Amino acid sequence: MAELFCIAVCDLFPGTNGSYPLSHQSPVMDERLRKYGSLVGSVVLVVVGTLATGILPATVPYQLLAGAIIVAGFGLGYIGLDALGVD
C-alpha cells in the first residue's frame, strides 16, 4: 500500500523521482509550499483583517490589531511574490 502511495505521489509531483522517503519532503514540495502557501496565507490574513475591522469594537487597540493583521498579510504576500520571482 505504501509503495502505491509513493508511486502516486511521485507521479503527482514531478521532480521527486521517488528518491525521497515518505518521512521527508522533497525540495520541490518545500518550494511549492513556500510559494503558494505564503500567497494563500496572505490572502487569508488580509481578508480576516478586513473583516475584523467591521466585527471588532471601534476602539483603538482592536483597530490596531486588525490593521496589524492586514499589514502582516501584505508582508507575507510580498514574500510569496518574491518566491515566485515577481519583481
Image (spheres, rainbow, N blue to C red):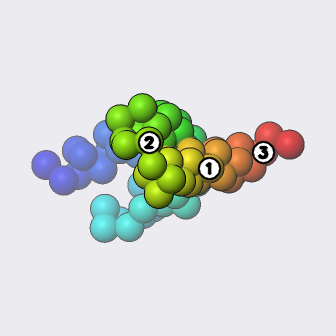
Residue 43 in view (yes/no): yes
Mark 3 vs 2, N-terminal side? 2
Secondary structure at badge 1 equals helix
Q: Amino acid at mark 2?
A: Ala
Q: Amino acid at mark 3?
A: Gly
Give the residue at mark 2: 58
For the residues bearing labels 1 and 2, Cβ distance under 8 angstroms: no
Secondary structure at badge 3 equals loop
Q: Amino acid at mark 1?
A: Val
Q: Crowding near pointer 3: few (<14 within 10 Å), some, many (20+)?
A: few
**Residue at 18% from the left image edge and 53% from the top image edge:** 2
Relative depth, front residue between 71 and 62: 62
Q: CA distance from mark 3 to mark 1?
A: 21 Å
Mark 3 vs 1, N-terminal side? 1
Give the residue at mark 1: 71
- Farthest-out residue, right: 87
Q: Is residue 72 above or below residue 86?
A: below
Q: CA distance from mark 3 to mark 2?
A: 39 Å
Mark 1 vs 2, N-terminal side? 2
Q: Where is the C terminus found, in terms of image quarters? A: top right
- Farthest-out residue, left: 1
- x, y (%) of residue 51? 42, 33
**Residue at 45% from the left image edge and 49% from the top image edge:** 59
**Residue at 35% from the left image edge and 35% from the top image edge:** 55
- Residue 20 occupies which quadrant of the picture? bottom left
- x, y (%) of residue 48? 43, 39
Give the residue at mark 3: 85
**Residue at 70% from the left image edge and 48% from the top image edge:** 78
Q: CA distance from mark 1 to mark 2?
A: 18 Å
Relative depth, front residue between 80 and 66: 66
The label on residue 3 is none
Residue 15 in view (yes/no): no
